[in-house]
Image (tube, helix red, strand yellow):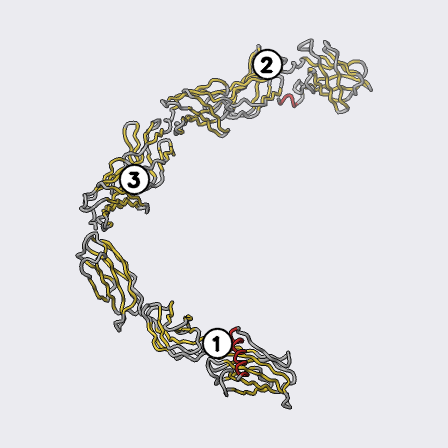
Amino acid sequence: MHSAKSKSLIFIGLLFNCLEMIFSSNAGFSMSIYNVTSQSIYLRWPKFSGASSYRVTATAVNTVGHSLLAHFSDVTLKGTLTSLIPNTIYAIQAEAIDKNGIILAETQIMQSTAPDIPVIDKAYSKLSNSITVEWRAVPGATSYLLTAQDGDSFIETVVTNSPGTLTGLKPATLYRVTIRSINSGGKSQPSPFRRAKTVLAAPILSVSSPSCDSIAVSWKAVYMAAGFSVSLMRSDGLGRMLKENTTNTSLIFTNLDPGTLYTIKAYAWNVNGIPGDDFTYNQRTIPCAPVNISVEGDEPGHLLVSWSSVNFGHYYVVFVKSDDGLEVHCNTSHTQCHFQSDCGFTYFISVFAYNKAGQSPLGNVLNYSTAPCCPSDFRAVLVASDTVEVTWAPVRGAEMYETRALGGSGVVRCNDTATACTLSALPCNTRYNITVYSFSEARGSNTSCASKYVATAPCSPEIKSISKEALSAISVHWQSNNEEATYIVTARGEAGLWHCTSSGNSCTLIHLPCGSAFSVSAIARSPAGQSLPSYSVPLETAPCCPNDLLLTQVTQSVTNISWSVGMGAQTYITTLESPKGQAKCHTLQNYCLLGCITCGTNYTVSLKAISETGLTSSCTYQGYSSSACCPSGVKLYRLGNNGIRVYWRASDETINYNTDLHGSKGNFTCTPSSGLSHCDITEIPCGDVYTVVVSPVTDKGPNLTFCPKKIYSVTCSGSSVGMVIYRGKSNAEQHI
């Protein structure tokens, strides 16, 4: 007895301290437990070197005569002890044995089995999210694990005693419910399951009082519901309760007291008539809605809302909501309210009455549209001299626009749904007051729109005359009645553009090129814009004087004159004039021959360039001097044996002459001293025919070629000059 008592005390001490006692003859061999149930203990151990088998013995500590022995091969390193007593402490010993049956090592552990499997007595649902379970207590169990399974999902909870409740469940759902007992050793196997179904969810009510004597109740359909019960009674307990059963999802209670608080309770029931969760809601009925609501736009930007007084109404709230979603309200004990308003909006106005019972139902909702906004940011632009284009941004509330231009002799109107208008054919140099009005079908026109002033372009000037002021200056005169206008005259031609500007009625175009044709027009400019150009007037400048002019004396009395082309000239008149007379020619060409020229005379040279229309430019050039006169009476005389004297009569004793003899045997020249009228040539070959020319000496270059050429034969007398015989003039001179 003493030994048994000691063992019992040792066990109890180990149990309360939750200690595992392990005894081993070899520190390399151990055993562990990985699962425990009511009648089973699951063991594992490591492989021990040299062992061919393992032997496990389980002995109940406080139960006499109950032990269990199991053998395992060397390849099995875990095992299960079954058929154990629930809620019982076992001493478990494992031994490693070699092939000769010798124990190589051993280890021991203490372990209790789990309590016995409980049995469910009842499983039921009173709320849509819970199931309550009842069972008989199991000896040795310190707590219980409740499980509710719906398909693959489950919910568990641990309780200490019966009854226990599983929460967080889905409404109207069938669950498999099990229970397991728990102690310090582990958990029992699950009990046989019981089926239990949660009740229906409560309908979620939406309650309102559509009138002062009714309450409307509605709800969404409830899963698995066959019908609904809805009850209503005064919250103060007075009166009788009203109850309705229905399969619909809405109903209305009527003939109620105004301004009274009612309590509404509703629940759903299934096909078996089992009720589900209930839902409670308090709703008050009241006051009746105000009537005779009116709206006035008492002044721009303000609205006045008024209504009839309501019985039992202590105060009123007016809500004004614009069509852009913005809402304002006012509280008052009177029967009117003032509100600020904006143009182009539609306002929705509702009035509620209040007393201690609450708010009246919604009465008539009045809508009121304010006048459309004004296009105050419009632009009026002069796009042509008589056309104004008016544009603006769209404004709220406008369905159509009217543009009015007031000025001159009347009003110009333009109506359109577009945000632009073109006013055309307006009188020039006129100031207009332009206004854009907006229209709506609901409110008509907004007559408070601002205006802008726009002036049309100045009137076109009318060129009255063009006059020549100088060689390259033309004065242009015009007529116009514009105010504050500047005039620009333009001469346009192939030679380019020339301008002059004036604020009066004339200006001068300068530096116009000669021999050019122009089209002259004028415009007027003012801050308002630019006029159309005037009618063009043709302008022709006098032809240009030729830049180059060349005179060449052809004969003693004929001179050839040539010149470069003068721009714009069609014909030319050239004149050589001296006190002795003048020579003139009129030609289409740029050259001519002038006869009757007096030799040795200074001439003035002039040329007139004449255009096709008769415009004339008088051109002067450097003076021209005709050549000195050729001598007359040229004769040859024999002089000595081999010499010749050439004799002539000089036209002027101050002129020097040059003598040339041309023959087949040689050419000879001599120039006498000043004042002499003969020249001697010595050593001239005889027996030859000579052409003799005596011409004045000029300082401009070679000898003149147009003096008479005479032919003489010089014969020989022996080897000396014989007779000199005159043969006449040369053929070239005879043909001239």
Q: Residue at x 19, y 57 (%)?
A: 238
Q: Of the numbered discs in the image, which one, if any, rests on residue 603? A: 2
Of labels 3 and 1, earlier in sequence is 1
**How far apart are the two marked residues, 3 and 1, measured between alpha carbons?**
78 Å
Specify the quadrant of the image occupied by residue 595. Answer: top right
Say which residue label 3 marks: 341
Residue at the far bottom: name it: 100
Front in this rendered view, residue 624 or 80: 80
Which residue type carries mark 3? Ser
Up the image or down, 86 lies above or below 712; here it is: below
Residue at the far front: name it: 2
Please say whether residue 103 is visible from this viewpoint.
yes
Say which residue label 1 marks: 186
Front in this rendered view, residue 371 or 683: 371
Q: Residue at x 50, y 86 (%)?
A: 64
Q: Secondary structure at mark 1?
A: loop
Asked if residue 454 lies left or right of residue 735, the reply is: left
**How far apart are the two marked residues, 1 and 2, measured between alpha carbons?**
154 Å
